[in-house]
């Protein structure tokens, strides 16, 4: 008998955290959802408040995403105010703690008595639980979480490792449903931090989750899951991630920083991805993370249909790409992808669970 499954799916972005309380006993359109500021934005505001108060700052907690949080720490230091940090929180600023201390941050285990303590984490499960309980909604026991992880290998730049990681995903059968982990690769230290905070959670890359999630749009699914294939693009607040996809397989991809993307530039990247002529070095030279293709991409062909999602998809508006709306809500593309991959993983473990309809 098919079991009922509840999943709390959280897509941790740079601007927002997008949350779906999935319940297979409901139609997916009736599942509860939240779109909230990302934790890096929340943490950044808390640090800015301490800066305005001219208070010493102590960073506690875990490695998390940077962006607004790291910028706020830099502004606190620039104001001539002291900063201390635990080793875990300090790695948000740089994986090499010597680089962190060189910024003027003291690494300590306990906060000074007069410091404002700001907790670093990609997750605030207590906050989500409290918000849901106000509306008589219980937090599911099963969690699926997406974060964007550059990875870290001592002596190797993060972007270089991430590019290698993405190439490996393509070469190891390229199945997008295999891009979710309960035991993340050792070098993916942001994923590892999430796994330590939430043991047993399913963890996925944000880009992979978003492009997998737009299969919930039937127009996209008709192309991407059929013989034609499709290019699926997520234009996030910080990163733009695109894959050449057919069936359940990724044949090629590129990743860039959204801040450097224009319509003309994106059109060129997409056309080169479709042709298989985009090179890793070319994307890196433009400031992106790189590109990768499967060895049999030249025989794959197709991928003429292009679908786009993400909070900055307006950048591509002049290009006429299909604006994907999975289950009627573009902002939940990431959580929908997380649920799809989690259900597939549970089925692979032998559990009788429903598949997520396209």
Image (cartoon, rainbow, N blue to C red):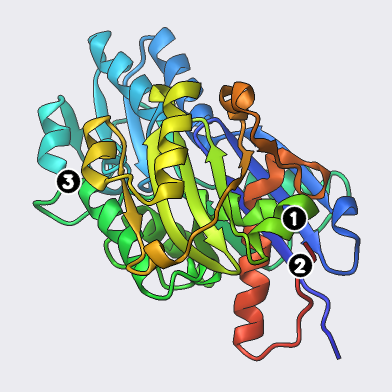
Nearer to us in this view, 114 or 153: 153
Local crowd size for mark 3, using a 10 Å CA cut-off: few (<14), some (14–19), many (≥20): few
The nearer-to-camera label among 3 and 2 is 2
Q: Is residue 280 left or right of residue 268?
A: left
Q: Position of residue 195 (x, y in %)?
A: 45, 64
Q: Position of residue 316 (x, y in %)?
A: 58, 27
Q: Which residue is mark 1?
A: 216
Tell me the distance, in whole angstroms, between the alpha carbons under discs 1 and 2.
8 Å
Disc on the earlier residue, 3 or 2: 3
Query: Vertically, is 192 above or below 124?
Result: below
Q: Which residue is mark 3?
A: 157
Q: Residue at the spot x=30%, y=48% of the render?
A: 88
Q: Which residue is mark 2?
A: 356
Tell me the distance, in whole angstroms, between the alpha carbons under discs 3 and 2.
37 Å
If the image is split into quadrants, where does the N terminus sit?
bottom right
Q: Position of residue 127 (x, y in %)?
A: 65, 43
Q: Is residue 29 left or right of residue 334?
A: right
Q: Position of residue 252 (x, y in %)?
A: 42, 56
Tell me the distance, in whole angstroms, between the alpha carbons under discs 3 and 1.
35 Å
């Amino acid at each position: 008998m098919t079991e009922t499954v509840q999943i709390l799916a959280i897509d941790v972005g740079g601007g927002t955290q997008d949350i779906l309380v999935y319940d297979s006993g409901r139609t997916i359109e009736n599942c509860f959802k939240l779109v909230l500021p990302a934790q890096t934005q929340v943490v950044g505001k808390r640090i800015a408040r301490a800066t305005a108060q001219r208070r010493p700052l102590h960073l506690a907690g875990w490695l998390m995403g940077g962006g607004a949080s790291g910028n706020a720490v830099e502004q606190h230091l620039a104001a001539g105010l002291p900063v201390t940090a635990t080793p875990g929180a300090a790695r948000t600023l740089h994986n090499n703690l010597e680089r962190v201390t060189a910024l003027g941050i003291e690494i300590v285990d306990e906060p000074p008595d007069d410091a404002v303590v700001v907790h670093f984490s990609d997750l605030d499960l207590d906050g989500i639980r409290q918000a849901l309980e106000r509306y008589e909604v219980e937090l599911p026991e099963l969690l699926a979480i997406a974060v964007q992880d550059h990875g870290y290998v001592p002596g190797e730049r993060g972007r270089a490792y991430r590019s290698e990681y993405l190439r490996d995903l393509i070469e190891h059968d390229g199945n997008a449903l295999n891009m979710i982990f309960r035991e993340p690769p050792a070098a993916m230290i942001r994923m590892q931090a999430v796994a330590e905070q939430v043991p047993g959670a399913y963890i996925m890359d944000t880009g992979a989750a978003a492009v997998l999630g737009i299969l919930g749009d039937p127009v996209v699914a008709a192309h991407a899951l059929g013989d034609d294939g499709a290019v699926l693009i997520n234009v996030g607040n910080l990163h733009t991630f695109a894959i050449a996809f057919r069936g359940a397989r990724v044949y090629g991809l590129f990743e860039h920083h959204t801040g450097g993307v224009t319509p003309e530039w994106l059109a060129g990247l997409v056309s080169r991805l479709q042709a298989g002529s985009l090179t890793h070095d070319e994307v890196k030279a433009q400031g992106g993370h790189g590109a990768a293709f499967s060895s049999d991409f030249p025989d794959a062909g197709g991928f003429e249909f292009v679908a786009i999602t993400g909070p900055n998809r307006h950048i591509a508006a002049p290009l006429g790409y299909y604006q994907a709306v999975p289950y009627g809500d573009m902002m939940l593309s990431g959580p929908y992808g997380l649920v799809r991959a989690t259900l597939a993983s549970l089925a692979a473990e032998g559990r009788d669970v429903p598949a997520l309809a396209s």
